[in-house]
Image: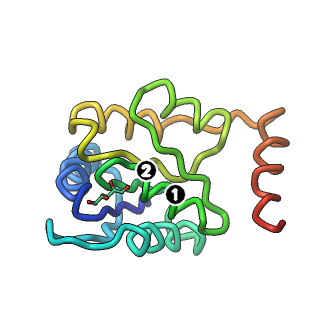
Amino acid sequence: MIAIGSDHGGFELKEAIKKHLEAQGVAYKDLGCYSAESVDYPAQAKKVCDEITAGNARLGILCCGTGIGISMAANKCKGIRAACCMDYFSAKYTRLHNDANVLCMGGRVVGPGLACELVDVFLNTEFEGGRHQRRVDQVMALENE
Ligand code: RB5
């Protein structure tokens, strides 16, 4: 299952991504927001991250206006490695090398066509492990300092 969420700035993009996931038969849980009414992105980030850390969701997708604020908030949640990606290479390599578990995008930055391509590569690329595991472990150890 994939957890997905947004603030108002990413709402339309989230809705487009949901349609794309449905067309592909990918199961998801929408943690809101549920309209274009203004909401604060940190709370939205936490809802999606909680689904991942609880083990309910394999990966998450978060959208705000830029993708940046919601990625900052997500990265404050323990166990989360959120990557704000607006290009294909980054979305692929953040899975391969960083084992990112949340993809963040900006609804005011990328269109739905590109965003859905980024979602596809993010969801379908596995972590390479090996030397990258050591580095990811070092990243996660920073949570305890
Ligand atoms: C909301 O206007 C906007 O600030 C938010 O969606 C996001 O872009 C923050 O990083």
Which quadrant holds the C terminus?
bottom right
Q: Secondary structure at mark 2?
A: helix
Seen in the picture, residue 33 relative to 109 is either above or below; the reply is below
What amino acid does circle 2 point to?
A: Ile
Seen in the picture, residue 1 relative to 38 is either above or below; the reply is above
Task: Name the residue nearer the viewer: 144 or 13.
Answer: 144
Q: Position of residue 117 (x, y in %)?
A: 33, 32
The residue lying at 80 percent from left, 41 percent from top is: 135
Image quarter for residue 64? bottom left
Q: Position of residue 110 (x, y in %)?
A: 27, 36
Could you classify mark 2 by the number of other residues whose Cα lies within 10 Å: few (under 14), some (14-19), or many (20 or more)? some
Q: Which residue is mark 2?
A: 68
Is the CB atom of the residue marked by disc 1 within 8 angstroms of ligand 1's nearest atom?
Answer: yes
Which quadrant holds the N terminus?
bottom left
Image quarter for residue 11? bottom left
Position of 81 with respect to 4 (left or right) is right
User: How many marks are shown on the rendered structure?
Assistant: 2
Query: CA–CA distance between discs 2 and 1?
Result: 6 Å
Q: Secondary structure at mark 1?
A: helix
Q: Which residue is mark 1?
A: 72
Q: Position of residue 111 (x, y in %)?
A: 21, 36
Q: Are marks 2 and 1 in contact (CB under 8 Å)?
A: yes
Is the CB atom of the residue marked by disc 2 within 8 angstroms of ligand 1's nearest atom?
Answer: yes
Q: Position of residue 89 (x, y in %)?
A: 49, 24
Could you classify mark 1 by the number of other residues whose Cα lies within 10 Å: few (under 14), some (14-19), or many (20 or more)? some
What amino acid does circle 1 point to?
A: Met
